[in-house]
Amino acid sequence: MFIGGQIAKFRKEKRMTQEQLGGAVGVTNRTVSKWESGTTSPGVDLIPSIASALGVSTDRLFGIVTQDIPEDSSGGIRIAVQGALSQVLPGALEEALDDLLPEYLNSIQPKDGYSLLVLSRDGLTVVPFCGKASVGYHKFSEKWSICISSPGGNVNLEGYESEKEASDDLKRIFTSFSNKLARIEL
């Protein structure tokens, strides 16, 4: 309820309609109305956009008043901020994590900036490996291949005579990836 009240307060001060605020942050006026009534809270990912649209800092949006605080009181600041956030954002962080974590875990983007560079046996294909791949059989070519899911799309490393041969190379890729090597030549 608190964040919704703050949104309503600053929106009215700025003489902005719910529809205008919703348009500025990419939601409907009904969503803004639900925030303001305390039915729901905005997701953590929207807070900076809301504050920007309302022309206030995120601190002001949360009702945090900035004061001159002695440098040695950082522990007190942390406790105050944690207390304010625990009142202001009940469940919002958990909701955001519930939404974003599965997407992150299922993403083929490199985690922590790491990917393994894989060079195919024929030396013609280079693909970043981020942890997702499978072995498959192609009826048309009657050959086995390794299909690597990469940020640019799926890439097939083709030309394996047997499933075992492709599986062995895939195991080498996973081992190299686990050991955080920079590249592997098949």
Image: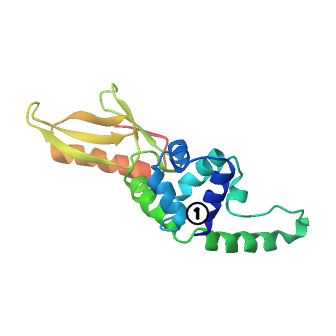
In the image, what residue occupies the spot 29% across and 44% down? 169
Name the kind of residue labelled 1 in the image: Gly
Residue underneath mark 1? 4
Which residue is nearer to you in this view: 128 or 26?
26
In the image, what residue occupies the spot 38% across and 34% down? 152
State the image coordinates of residue 128 (x, y, percent, origin top left). 41, 38
In the image, what residue occupies the spot 68% across and 55% down? 58
> In the picture shown, does residue 24 fall above or below 43?
above
Q: In the current view of this chain or complex, which residue is farthest to the top?
A: 124
Which quarter of the rendered picture does the N terminus lie within?
A: bottom right
Q: Quadrant of residue 53?
A: top right
In the image, what residue occupies the spot 43% across and 45% down? 109
Which quarter of the rendered picture does the C terminus lie within?
A: top left
Q: Residues within 10 Å of mark 1 (few under 14, many from 20)?
A: many
Element type at mark 1: helix
Q: Is residue 34 left or right of residue 2?
A: left
Number of marks present in the image shown: 1
Which residue is nearer to you in this view: 174 or 16?
16
Which residue is nearer to you in this view: 152 or 97?
97
Q: What colour scheme has been applied to the protein in the rendered image?
A: rainbow
> In the picture shown, does residue 46 fall above or below 158?
below
State the image coordinates of residue 178 (x, y, percent, origin top left). 43, 54
The answer to whether one can see residue 179 in this image is: no
Q: Is residue 75 left or right of residue 8?
A: right
Q: Is residue 77 left or right of residue 106?
A: right
Q: Is residue 27 left or right of residue 51?
A: left
The answer to whether one can see residue 43 in this image is: yes
State the image coordinates of residue 56 (x, y, percent, origin top left). 71, 50
State the image coordinates of residue 71 (x, y, percent, origin top left). 89, 65
